[in-house]
Amino acid sequence: MTTLLEKQKNMALVDALTGINNRRYFDERLPTEISRSQRYNKPLSCLYIGVDHFKQFNNDYGHINGNKALKQIAQKIWQELRATDILGRYSEEEFAVLLIETDMISAREVAERIRRSIQKQQVEIEGRTIEITVSVGVSSSQPCREQINCPGL
């Protein structure tokens, strides 16, 4: 019975298409990681990755090929992350990443590495090579060095 419950919980937190965490998992982890960042005075960064022109891609090449592209994109993002980072499929063509103990400068480097990696990857569809690109937004919270200047303390 325990394994069935574990399997159901896993299914509820994993995106069926890509095999990565889903938005629910990401949303559950976010407050925990913000709290941990504040408690240990460590930076926390977030990447928001959107596949450029994905709706047009689906219209031009079909949903099956769109799904194929999303799987490849998720895999490429995952390959650029550390085991401690948290990746989730946030919506149809958007992904979110929490970069644990990562400041803004390092987060920008990761974002650019992901962007380049996906752009280099080309999807083969019906004998045609299609380039896919993503846009990446980056935000970061830096720890307070002095408690006297920290809001809420």
Image: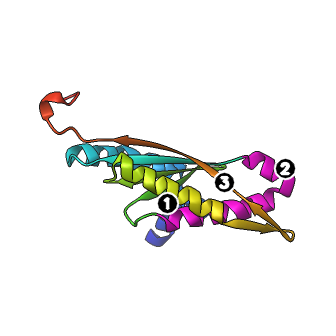
- Per the image, the residue denoted by label 2 is 59
**Residue 115 visible in rendering:** yes
Residue segment shown in magenta: 53-80
Q: Earlier in the sequence, mark 1 or mark 2?
A: 1
- Mark 3: secondary structure: loop
- Mark 1: secondary structure: helix
Q: Earlier in the sequence, mark 2 or mark 3?
A: 2
- Mark 2: secondary structure: helix
Q: Earlier in the sequence, mark 1 or mark 3?
A: 1
Q: Quadrant of the C terminus?
A: top left
In the displayed structure image, the side of residue 79 where residue 34 appears, left or right: left
- Per the image, the residue denoted by label 3 is 133
Residue at (74, 66) in percent of width and height: 123
- Amino acid type for the residue under numbered disc 3: Thr
Q: CA distance from mark 1 to mark 3?
A: 33 Å
Query: Between tags 1 and 3, which lies in front?
Result: 3
